[in-house]
Amino acid sequence: MTRSGSDPQALGAGQPNSARVWNALLGGKDNFAADRDAADALVAQLPEIREFARAGREFLARSIGFLAGEAGIRQFIDVGTGLPTADNTHELAQRIAPESRIVYVDNDPVVLTHARALLVSDPAGATSYLDADARDPEKILQAAAATLDFSQPVAVMLIGILGHIPDADDPARIVRTFVDALAPGSYLVINDSITTPANDSAGETVKSERTTYYLRTVEQITRFFDGLELLAPGVVSTPLWRPAPGPAPREIAVYCGVARKN
């Protein structure tokens, strides 16, 4: 990890950390050798995972561009935010609407330390950070109410987080709890990797030491949006969701969708 003044021992440099592993997959510098080794192990199981990580970041930018722009959303909850990198949720939203208010959620002390130090809000808006587990949406919603007004529309961003939640923890219930708390005109945004004939032999999971990612089918991801109005083009391979002008993007085994609560 290259950040000056960091104590590698205090940061658990000898053990991989899921947020730092993802940072390594994205080509970031906030990681240690153990994280890079874990990232390499994931790539050995799922060679496209670096491309998946990049596609997720690009989708975050496109979806927030739509939400803060055309949809007029001014409140966001980013669950499982991961380590800060370029173009974080509040930067993307406040670039369009400086008054936007963003709540970041993570239960990793490494992430929270970096977030509080680096993610500075535009003075016209607000940014806060919650130490909470994605599997406890009630706690997240209660704490987020200190920053957000839930009588007004909110966008819930679940970018690459549901894959960290096993079926035993009922991710569908988690999603429903968030959606039920939202006002009409709110949005749900999901992005996650899917099973394919190539990776299904891994038992629908990708594992590397302490990092486990649960792959689901396109149909399972689509069901997370039940009861909501899916925006065109629906649940599709992430690069195909409203791509920027240019060469036609390639379909990959990571899917996404954006839906509105009416």
Image (cartoon, grey):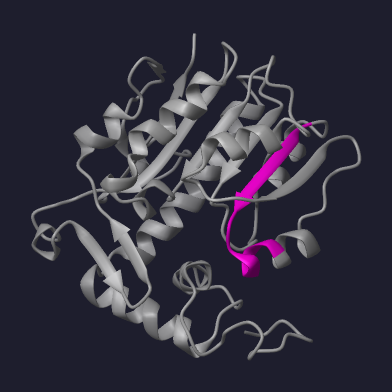
The residue positioned 71% from the left and 60% from the top of the image is 115
Q: Residue furthest right?
A: 123
The picture quadrant where one finds residue 100 is: top right
Q: In the figure, 199 relative to 147: above or below?
A: below
Q: Is residue 175 among the parts visible in the rendering?
A: yes
> Magenta residues, as a range?
100-112
Q: In the figure, 36 relative to 52: above or below?
A: below
**Residue 207 placement, left or right of 229:** left
- Residue 249 x %, y %: 34, 46
Q: Is residue 242 among the parts visible in the rendering?
A: no
Who is closer to the viewer here, 192 or 224? 224
Q: How many numbered marks have been drawn onto this rendered protein structure?
A: 0
- Residue 39 x %, y %: 38, 76
- Residue 200 x %, y %: 11, 57
Who is closer to the viewer here, 261 or 46? 261
Whether residue 107 is in magenta: the answer is yes
The residue positioned 36% from the left and 39% from the top of the image is 171
Whether residue 66 is in magenta: the answer is no
Q: Quadrant of the N terminus?
A: bottom right
Q: In the figure, 200 relative to 211: above or below?
A: above
The residue positioned 56% from the left and 87% from the top of the image is 13
- Residue 149 x %, y %: 74, 22
The residue positioned 51% from the left and 42% from the top of the image is 136
**Residue 230 placement, left or right of 132:** left
Who is closer to the viewer here, 188 or 148? 148
The picture quadrant where one finds residue 198 is: bottom left
**Residue 208 placement, left or right of 198:** right
